Amino acid sequence: MKFKVPRGTQDILPSETWKWQQVEKIIDELCDLYRYKEIRTPIFEQTELFQRLVGDTTDVVQKEMYTFTDKGDRSLTLRPEGTAPVVRSFVENKMFGYPDQPVKLYYTGPMFRYERQQAGRYRQFVQFGAEAIGSADPAIDAEVIALALDVYKRAGLKHLKLVLNSLGDTECRTAHRKALVAHFGPHIGEFCADCQSRLEKNPLRILDCKVDHGHPLIASAPSLADYLNEESARYFEDVKSYLDNLGIEYEVDANLVRGLDYYNHTAFEIMSTSDGFGAITTLCGGGRYNGLAEEIGGPSAPGIGFAMSIERLLLAMEAEGKTFQEEPALDVYIVTLGEQARQPGFKLLGELRAAGIRSEMDYMDRKMKAQMKSADRLQARMVVLLGEDEVAEGVVQLKNMANGEQVKVPVAELIEKMKETLLG
């Protein structure tokens, strides 16, 4: 029987992991710069956590979650997104009691959604996300957006567009909800079954429907911007003002609602405008989620965050022709000749690695010519030749692969000689 990688997943091979590591380095360095601390939550959580926080009218909860019952008859779900687990941990571990607020956290890890595989979209995918919990200051909204943009800019992307909207507070949402029900109600039979069920539960989700997005009633639907109260409108203006101060350009889109139920006030997406990127342009999405901590028994702790797919970031880099720094070349390859040179060669390998010198040797009992070819394929900068005569004399032959120069070096002086050669 032949086994294949499960549909919607992928093997990330060594030739590609170097790219991932460089992206993760960018993320770690920027989060340190912004003072966001890494958090690692479980791969699976109680199913009810996502039902309550993500929203039972969302596509994520209704159609896309990988849910199973464990041996204790508990319903568990592989995490489809990162905010709910982070908020759960924030409440459970009483981070609201930390002296420094807001608590600024970030995560990078696999998420799971059962959806149709597309370019850059998988059923197991890797997300980087950041959350700032504990502050209702519009300045932190601007900071979170700036962090997301900086990741893309540090990765070399130039064709980016930031889109903003305000979803308002509960009062605004309630008034807007009534207007949407009145707008869609008489014609709801023209919409898909999902939208029909959303009409009473959460009509705002109709605006984000993938099936009926071209229906004329969606284009003419009441705008949430017309229902913002004074406080919500002022908050949104403050967010835009802070972005202006950072020199960040943006567009306001009154139809931007995001795909999760917990958002309020600020919502945003970052899109690729590169010609070669494809039809689905969204790279990153996020927004404010005041009230989420209270929903699971915590105190008032307003928050804002975002999540981005690493796969789609890499796809956007490819579309813009951005290349990564080459993987560091091998410093030295040890070629051993004869059985008596094997043990001394292996000992030398360990000493070189202990000194921080990237080193390798042959493990296939190949002849000298084949070992030299291996050193060349691995782009070794230097080759150490060690035969029985060299072992007896306490020396090695050190060959510079760039110019072919070969010198005899005492074993005791090799590491110092290697460092001089590699550095200079």
Image (cartoon, rainbow, N blue to C red):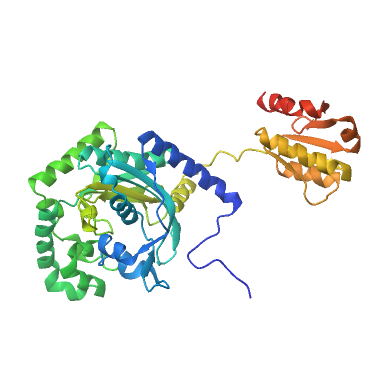
The reply to whether residue 122 is in sight is no
In the displayed structure, does residue 108 sit left or right of residue 223? right
Q: Position of residue 296 (x, y in %)?
A: 24, 58
Question: Which quadrant: the N terminus?
Answer: bottom right
Q: Position of residue 157 (x, y in %)?
A: 42, 41
Q: Is residue 282 above or below residue 423?
A: below
Q: Is residue 166 above or below residue 188?
A: above
Residue found 13% across the figure and 57% down from its top: 173
Number of numbered tags placed on the structure image? 0
Q: Give residue 79's quadrant in the image.
A: bottom left
Q: Give residue 375's quadrant in the image.
A: top right
The reply to whether residue 193 is in sight is yes
Residue found 25% across the figure and 47% down from its top: 303
Q: Is residue 212 above or below residue 374?
A: below
Residue found 27% across the figure and 56% down from its top: 258
Q: Is residue 198 above or below residue 235?
A: below
Q: Position of residue 139 (x, y in %)?
A: 23, 37
